[in-house]
Image: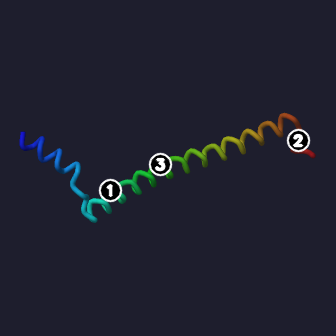
Amino acid sequence: MKQLLDWFISRFKAMSVEDIARREYENARRSLLQCQSMQEYYENMVRFETQRIERLSKMLNLDRE
């Protein structure tokens, strides 16, 4: 019962500056990870589209123009 009461009280207690900074730090790390994943994805998409254009250009003999 005491644990439940302590948990409930902690939900309404103001967060310390350190707790806020820690939460923001973790959010920044998650955001960085997501951005790095998207960077890898788009780098691969650029490579894919470049190869596709080259292949289609050769097929259509556009590389001679």
Q: Earlier in the sequence, mark 2 or mark 3?
A: 3
**Disc 3 vs disc 1: which is toward the camera?**
1
Residue that lies at the very extreme toward the left in this rendered image: 2
Q: Work out whether residue 7 or residue 52 is closer to the camera in this orientation and state it.
A: 7
Question: Farthest residue in the bottom direction?
Answer: 17
Label 2 and label 3: CA atoms lie apart by 38 Å
- Which quarter of the rendered picture does the N terminus lie within? top left
- Secondary element type, mark 2: helix
Residue located beneath label 1 in the image: 23
Q: How far from the left and from the top, in percent, is residue 6? A: 12, 47
Place of residue 61 in the rendered image (x, y in percent of width and height, measured from the top left): 89, 38
Residue at (23%, 51%) from the top-left corner? 12
Q: Which mark is residue 62?
A: 2
Q: Which residue is mark 3?
A: 34
Residue type at mark 1: give it: Arg
The residue lying toward the viewer, choosing from 22 and 15, is 15
**Image quarter for residue 60?**
top right
Towards the viewer: 21 or 2: 2
Label 1, secondary structure: give it: helix
Looking at marks 1 and 2 on the same chain, the residue that comes earlier in the sequence is marked by: 1
